[in-house]
Image: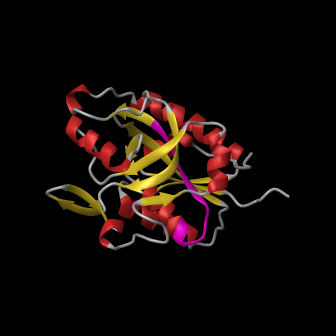
Amino acid sequence: MPDPRPVLIVTAVEAEARAIGLLSGARVIAGGIGRTNAACATCEALLGPDRFRAVLSAGVAGALPGSGLAVTDPLVASACIYAEEGLVTRDGFVTLEAIGLSLGDFPGNAVPVDEALLDALGRLFPIGPIATVATCSGTDEAAAAVQARTGALAEAMEGAAVVHAARRLGVPAIELRVMSNLTGDRAHQQWNLPGALDRLGTVVRDAVRALGGR
């Protein structure tokens, strides 16, 4: 029998939630910008009275150098990678794993996504790692550093926190983004936020259907 529980969709801002709209088989919340808001909102929802079969971190993102992604392209996270957690030395960035510390029940800074969700959504959309940053890349150097540090194709500010929180509570989770801009020098970035939000609504509706929604 189909699972009657809805999918929890966590966005950062109301504009993303409005772009997705009301969906059968899903509940959409705007949890706030950044990792703390994202993790808290996810936990509040999952620990509340409703029960969810999956969590989807959804919203817009910036495409990193060399990703091959264009503005309004979708991307499903193959992993959600914390970009800042670690140690900065004169020789470069060192991960927590390299200094004997751990972020959770997974190696390094990459929070695993649920394999079944990845299989379902990977049939519809491109897949690749997405970095979760505290500071967005507004220079070419910053964008290149995030890409080199994480190997990610895009950056956003919440995905790893949403998926990590859901993982701790035993709920399958994944991240799905639409590119609103290309990262790099702020004065020369390409942007299409209205187009990305419009595409986000379509992409998330397709994703919910692929996950068993109506």
**Magenta range:** 167-178
Q: By what rule are the colours in the image chosen?
A: secondary structure
**x then y, percent, for residue 171:** 61, 66
Report the front residue among 148 and 55. 148
The part of the image, by quadrant, that contains residue 33 is: bottom left
Q: Is residue 193 magenta?
A: no
Q: Is residue 209 above or below residue 187?
A: below
Tell me the quadrant of the picture where the N terminus can be found.
bottom right
Question: x, y percentage for residue 159?
Answer: 45, 54
Q: Residue furthest right?
A: 1
The relative height of residue 68 versus residue 6 in the rendered view (above or below) is: above
Q: Residue at x 59, y 42 (%)?
A: 204
Quadrant location of the C terminus?
top right
Q: Is residue 95 visible?
A: yes
Instruction: Tell me where residue 52 sits by quadrant.
Output: bottom right
- Residue 199, image x and y in percent? 53, 32
Q: Residue at x 41, y 54 (%)?
A: 81
What is the number of callouts on the image?
A: 0
Residue 139: tell me if it is visible: no
**Horizontal and vertical percent position of residue 90:** 13, 57
Q: Is residue 176 magenta?
A: yes
Q: Is residue 192 left or right of residue 53?
A: left
Q: Quick one: 14 or 203, which is closer to the camera?
A: 203
> Residue placed at 54% from the left, 67% from the top?
167
Please state if 156 lies on the left or on the right of 25 as rendered. left
In terms of depth relative to the viewer, which is nearer, 9 or 110? 110
Question: Is residue 172 depicted above or below 144 in this figure?
Answer: below
**Looking at the image, which residue is at 37% across and 44% down?**
155
Q: Is residue 141 left or right of residue 128?
A: left
